[in-house]
Image (cartoon, rainbow, N blue to C red):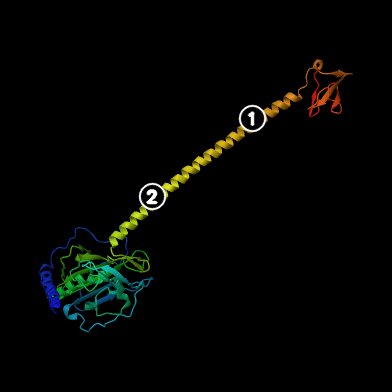
Amino acid sequence: MFKLFKKTLLVAVLSGTIGILSTNTVSADKSYRDTTLTDVAQHPMNFNKSKQMVLHDKDKQHRATDSHIQLSYAEKPTAKRAPRLEYNPVGWHNYRFKYEKSNGKISKEWLFNRGHLVGYQFSGLNDESRNLVPETAYLNCGALKSMNIANKKSMLYYENHLASWLKKNKGYRLDYQVTPMYRNNELIPRQIRLAYIGYKDNGKKTIINLQSYREEKGNDDATVVYLDNDSPNAIINYTNGTAKNTLNKENTLKKEKENAEKASSEAAVSSEKSAHDASESSAREASLANSRANEAATAASSAQEQSQSVVTPAADNSVNNTSGYKWAIQDGFDWQTRKGHSTRIASGGSLPAGYHWQVQ
């Protein structure tokens, strides 16, 4: 009971502060927007003295795309919200993941919530498919377990303070647009954009400043906030909604990046070595082929010279002559062993292949 009292008191104190500072100019040190993501255009609705609620149709991937409301404090829903949600938005999976508590002990809690874009406390919508997306518990409630109303990275912080702003300014109207932001055809939004502005009872706009470092200037004087749909104990596959557990996402991602860079470097070195080895092998083969070609050319030249030397007849006065004939003796034999291996060639005749003139 005491904890509940403290929490209520904290919200009341913050509400008073926000009521006083709600007209301050909004500025941010930097933009938290991921410019690679697609979204629906951000613009406040025209002022109207009655409640307006506009839900964009789901896209071809069956994803919710935008939820927009304008209302006064008196138009907030009063019916009690149903305890359970039945609709599973596209990409819905859930896991009980480990996480490290502040005391160092390890516990488990659900990773995802079926997250309302415009919260039930404004819309009164519960199982409306156009108003639901998979959101991490950390984005939705500001903590891995239970709630942290002070976490400015969570939707809970802004929803509670906008509700307090409405209560503090009962004669004003709140214009509140919530847009899931996707990368291409991924099923899970990587960011959620909140956009809010007030209208006085005469229709004049008033800037709402919730004293968050993540607030930025939006279109048409609205304040916008970009919140990441992630969790410090999970690495999410936004394509299909699957995820893996890690007790320290930052360290895990850093190690994975280092391992990937090391593998890439080793692959580059291996590729360079293979290319170098292949180049040397090609050079050796080319040199060997060139050497063999030179040897073949030399052998051919030598054979040709030998053939020319053999077939060139000696002068007539240096060979054995008999009655105008010349003796041709088969190679490997001489005058003494010529029997059966010699022939007479008429004067002027050609030397047969495989024979030589007999020199005396």
Residue situated in front as seen by the camera: 263 or 15: 263
Looking at the rendered image, the quarter that the N terminus falls into is: bottom left
Q: Where is residue 266 in the image (x, y as percent from the top left)?
A: 40, 50
Q: Where is residue 67 in the image (x, y as percent from the top left)?
A: 28, 73
Residue 212, relative to residue 286: is it above or below?
below
* Pointer 1 residue: 298
The amino acid type, in three-letter code, at marker 2 is: Ser
Hey, which residue is sitting farthest top in the picture?
Answer: 317
Q: At 22% from the left edge and 77% from the top edge, which residue is drawn? A: 122
Q: Can residue 251 be seen in this view?
A: yes
* Pointer 2 residue: 265
Could you tell which of marks 2 and 1 lies nearer the N-terminus?
A: 2
Hey, which residue is sitting farthest bottom in the picture?
Answer: 79
Residue situated in front as seen by the camera: 97 or 180: 97
Q: Is residue 27 left or right of residue 319?
A: left
Looking at the rendered image, the quarter that the C terminus falls into is: top right
Residue situated in front as seen by the camera: 23 or 102: 102
Hey, which residue is sitting farthest right in the picture?
Answer: 323
Q: At 25% from the left edge and 77% from the top edge, which residue is drawn? A: 53
Name the disc covering residue 135, or none.
none
Q: Count the marks: how many?
A: 2
